[in-house]
Amino acid sequence: MSHLSFVVVGHVDHGKSTLIGRLLFDTHSVEEGKAERIQAACKAEGMEFEYAFLMDALLEEQAQNITMDTTRVPFRTPGRDYTIIDAPGHKEFLKNMITGAASADAAVLLVDAHEGLREQTRRHGYLLSLLGLSQIVVAVNKMDLVDYDRGVYDRIRAELGGFLGQLGITPAHFVPISAKLGHGIIGLSDKMPWYTGPALLETLEGFHTRPAPNAAPLRFCVQDVYRFDARRIVAGIVEAGRLSAGDPLVFCPGGKRTRVKSIECWPASAEGGRGSVPVPAGRVAAVTLEDELFVERGQVGAPPDATPVEAHEFTARLFWLHEEPLRIGDVLPLRLGTQQAETTLLAIERVLDAVTLETQARPAAEVRRHEVAQIRLRVRRPIAFDPGGRIPALGRFVLLRGRRIAGGGVIDAAHAEVPASGSDLPIKLSARATMLGHCGAVVWLTGFSGSGKSTLAAALEKELFRVGVLPTVLDGDVLRTGLCRGLGFSQEDRKENMRRAAEAALLLARTGAVVITALISPFREDRRLAAELCRKNGVPFAEVFVNAPLAECERRDPKRLYQKARAGQIPSFTGIDSPYEAPLAPDLELRTDRESVEQSIEKLSRLVLTLARPSRDDQGAGI
Amino acid sequence: MRKAPTAPASSNSRSHVSHLDELESQGIYLLREAFHSFERPAMLWSMGKDSNVLIWLAKKAFCGHIPFPVVHIDTTYEFPEMLEFRAWARDHHGFDLIVWTNEEARARGIGYETTDPVTVTHELKTVALQQCLAAHKFDALVTGIRRDEDSTRAKERYFSPRTADFEWDYKDQPPEFWNHFTTEVGAGEHVRVQPLLDWTEIDIWAYLEREKVPLPGMYFARNGRRYRSLGCWPITKDVPSKASTIAEIIEELKITRVSERSGRAQDNHERNAMQKLRAKGFM
């Protein structure tokens, strides 16, 4: 029988280390003299010997009575070789449990008969489902503490079975045991004649190594390209399917096509240096290609008729392990297969309480450590993946914070998909929108000097940037010192100034940016022309009236301009000796004398996010 | 030195073959990730059996090449036969060998003749390695440690960051799953890359036999004794054994429950010796 690795999870103090110690001891897997040495040490220190001590070799662990980190322990039965992955139950060590459980074939979920289901019993159950573990046995431990009572066992079985059922997990068995006294582990216990299922070890013997996805379409993830000698070798791992010489391949993202020329082996004596046997799923491979394509790390070789999805956005279920919460707008490196890309958290659709499986009531602006959430992510450049569990290795990712892996997730659905193969046509506005996640747009702030245009423009720019929108500000004062230097304040010059501002806004918006103008722009006709210019070129335009009464603006007078105008030092100053034509039907009016900057920014963001929403979005959802 | 004997294949079931294939594949994957991720990786080579598996895996990973230096920390207490093997293997495999000794400690008179074995190991192995790392500015070090060697090693990661002082923060190790690892370090820090973490002693032997990896002859019984683990000659004892082929060694291991490193004096020198060595940065 094949090698089996399994993880032992469950609430702290429900007996994980004791169970492992017992399994080692009862299968005669403990090094000669070790149990005796620890027994002697316990006696010397006046402690009761516990099987857990066999596991807890580090000094600190013996002091604190908790297992500190993931531990892998081999043991052997006549039937097969095992690796036990011991994952700790202490809440802050969840990362170690995931580190251990992610690579396991099966899991033992321990629950204390005396204490019943606890928070981590459920949390670990949820994570096992997220990690894709389907072979699970529940061990109802410490039956000795409840007098081997069938009623206790039945209640736990019903409660935990119901919870796991909601997650789509059906445990192979619920085995009543006493790890401390050795009941129900190697064989059935005469203390519990009412239990007729298999003992724990027998259940494990019936589990299988996680099957490799050999039948799935090929996914060859490129690790590197080597040119150590005359050969140009593409090295990678076959995450799914089988890779053979002669296979036609498309490398995604990108869509370049070629064929596998050879599978390279070392030493050369092995099959003449050329692999004639297909490389199965889960194994590394090194190949040469028929064509001299530019192939790079991160790309996924796939059959032309069954390529992965390429997209900029996706929804996922995520668990978060970093002490600093994950917040909307955070930009973090994402790794999926061998791809790495900068990603922005666009939305937290809901934060799940892994214990009750209920959505938390608090507004989800962040995902905290040890929480599980449904989120929406956007990557700067498209990545190739397989959503919805079709090919697990290509549907899961990690996020990094600093140098650390900070969380992991499973992709449920793709959004903002890129057409399967790259097109040679010029880049359209819609393609830019797909890349950035929003359209270019112009938000035209108009109002008196001192009404708050520059303040709002700067604050809006920051806010938009924070949520992953590319913003830029066109400020009247800045234009006047650069692009429009040399223009005066005559009616003609003012018109030319407005024309140039509108053209500049259009150019920037057509690169995909959201342009925020901060110009007095007092004349309706100028603003109408700017709006018309943008709209006829496919750029959404919104007029925002930043409205504060002239008296208020003059009282603020941040640049002392009103003072100078009253003194006659500035001619044709809007509001003093030049008219301001207020918008008749602005898209948004902000009374900056009555509302705070925060209130105005909230309204502005809402306006921009509506204005710049890509119209083609979500076409690829749910496939 | 000797080539691996071509004894009749032991009772390798199909599943054991595939288990070795999986371990080999994982080792290659890790080596390629290390080579991609770090600017100045190096591989530690003690000339022992695990080390020679590393060399073999590297040649498989990089199609016959070893694209980073191989470091031997020479305590000056090497068995002469091992030094012979070192020279032979370097030429045979064609790698860039760096031999490093803590000359300063030797000059101070640190040695098994005068000092306790834990101190000697610290000075001539750990400190020597620190010196070598600093001199060559390595940012990743491939090592051959296995989780089954002793219980403190059971808690390792495949990519295990070490501080500039070689400290291993085993209480707060980074998460590592789905084939994603810690691949960046700060200035002066390095990552231990451990491709053999999941291998057992029996896996190592089964692989050495299958692949016919060249090994030092001292592992095989001569006059009824052999070395199960090779360290400095003053503190390494041979054990009684009749095993003169790898197949016989594997059979021997299947029935023993004595720890692999029991022939290493420094491990038994005092309670928790390994723990101390480890905290100080010994592999």
Image: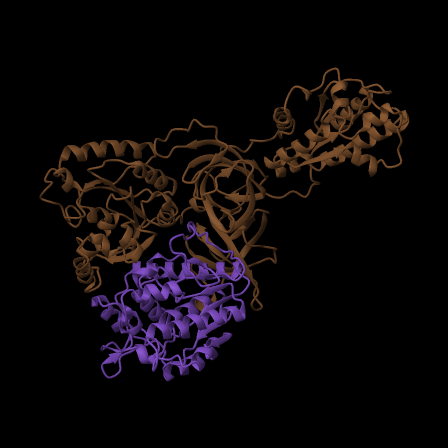
Q: Is residue A199 above or below residue A372?
A: below
The chain drawn in brown is A
Q: Is residue A269 visible?
A: no
Q: Is residue A223 visible?
A: yes
B116 horizontally vs A223: left or right: left
Give the color of chain B as drawn. Answer: purple
Of residue A196 and residue B72, the one placed in the foreground of this image is B72
- The x, y position of residue B53, in whole percent, is 39, 69
- The x, y position of residue B226, in whole percent, is 27, 78
- The x, y position of residue B217, in whole percent, is 33, 80
Give the residue at the far top of this rendering. Answer: A584
Q: Is residue B191 above or below residue A529?
A: below
Q: Quadrant of residue A429?
A: top right
Q: Is residue A291 above or below residue A320?
A: below
Q: Quadrant of residue B281?
A: bottom left
Q: Is residue A52 above or below residue A422?
A: below
- In which quadrant will I find the N terminus of chain A? bottom left
- The x, y position of residue B101, in whole percent, is 45, 77
Q: Quadrant of residue A560?
A: top right
- What residue appears at the point 14 percent right and 35 percent down from the top-left corner? A150
Q: How many marks?
A: 0
